[in-house]
Image (cartoon, rainbow, N blue to C red):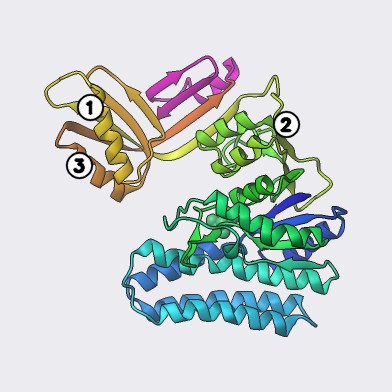
Amino acid sequence: MKVYKFGGASVNSAERVANVAGILERCSEPELVIVISAMGKTTNALEKVAQAFFENKQDAALQLFEEIKKQHITVAKYLLVTHYLACEARLKDFFTEVEWLLHDQPVREYDYYYDQIVSIGELLSTCIVSFYLNERGITNEWIDVRDIFRTDDNFRDANIELSFTQKNIEEQVLPLIKNKKWIVTQGFIGATDENESTTLGREGSDYSAALFANLLDAESLTIWKDVQNVMNADPKEIPDAVPLPSLSYSEVIEMAYYGAQVIHPKTIKPLQNKNIPLYVKCFLDAALPGTIIHNTITKNLPPIIVIKRNQVMMELKTKDFAFVGDAHAYQLYQWFNEHSLRPTLTQNGAISLTFAFDNWEDKIAKFSSAAAGLFDVHVTPGLTLTTIRHYDAEALNKYVNEKELLVKQQTVKNIRVLHR
Ligand code: ASP
Ligand code: MG
């Protein structure tokens, strides 16, 4: 059994959906679970609907939603003939789910409404793809993953309840697969025990696919992307970036931790726990080998460069020049937690602590004013954080030595610099 995951870019138009069908036609795997994201930028568009609704701009919300409806109906019309009416009826049920909600006034917290609205993106895309595959003779069963993935009610960043989910997989998914059915289902979403929709965090479909692979003891997971390989750097930042044909799980976890936008950070653990290899392949040219991520350490990796822009440095000095102690650190991490702030870099000194953050202005402002009771706080925006794993002299010359550095951290394997 294998799991395939197709991201939003692979289904962002009728042509791209047809291309996915082409890949699946050439797949001879008898048992396949296909996890799909929302089409193209649908999630961003749905976020705008949720915002407008929450700001009590009901007309604007409905109008924005109308656009999303139109786009999906257009793609469905283009792709489907015999199955069009059945598909349209299903799409309309999902539209109605959202429109009912949009006609109300918001009374609960934003994150709850966000999840009820944004989760529709994956339901729409998978509905169209599933009907289209069936029409092309690629027989599959569509599953509403909200009946399978049980989560807590931590909306927008929900946590999977594994034992319930495992039971649902065994009772509902496995029998279908054993019946020689391919499954088409959604990434990124789940539901609480009260049947409220939840989402697992932006870009969470990779993680959903990894969970399926883990719970089904799949032979492998393939993530189909618009890039040929995982690279040693973002080619938009570094034009002479090189492909990495093979990576270990731990290397990818490190890369994701330092901010590389390769794969959702939560994806690796469920795979590593069961030693399931992850293939990253290009949906535009399925014949290319791509990258394999597995349990094997790759020697002689080139320097891996992760550049995070728009960073803010925050220096905190104790007011009375007292040494920084456990109590200070404990208090700070409590505030981080309260404000959902995660530092991208931390550095301890005798009487000061230094952090870098992604530039979430409102959270940083709230955090600074909380911290101002204990510390003198100094904030410097507009910085870049560069991390190089497996650095060599050439990489240091190119990406570090010329820069105006504010913080530098160096270990045997990594160098991290915060610079202008
Ligand atoms: N559609 C969701 C997003 O854009 C989930 C995903 O694509 O993985 O964040
Ligand atoms: Mg995506």
Q: Nearer the viewer, residue 88 or 157?
A: 157
Q: Earlier in the sequence, mark 1 or mark 2?
A: 2
In the depicted structure, whether residue 173 falls above or below residue 303: below
Instruction: Give SS at disc 1.
Output: helix
Q: Earlier in the sequence, mark 2 or mark 3?
A: 2
Examine the structure image and report whether residue 411 is included in the region drawn in magenta. Answer: yes
Whether residue 14 is visible, yes or no, is no
Left or right of 77 in this view: 388: left
Left or right placement of residue 390 versus residue 359 in this view? right
> From which residue to which does the magenta span run?
391-418
Q: Amino acid at mark 3?
A: Ala
Q: Between label 1 and label 2, give the one nearer the viewer.
A: 1
Amino acid type, label 1: Ala
Q: Is mark 3 within 8 Å of ligand 1?
A: no
Who's the residue at 68% across and 47% down the image?
213
Q: Say left or right for 154 vs 35.
A: left
Which residue is at a point 56% across and 24% down the rendered structure image?
Answer: 389
Report the residue marked by disc 2.
246
Q: Position of residue 110 (x, y in %)?
A: 36, 64
Amino acid type at image mark 2: Ser
Q: Which residue is mark 1?
A: 327
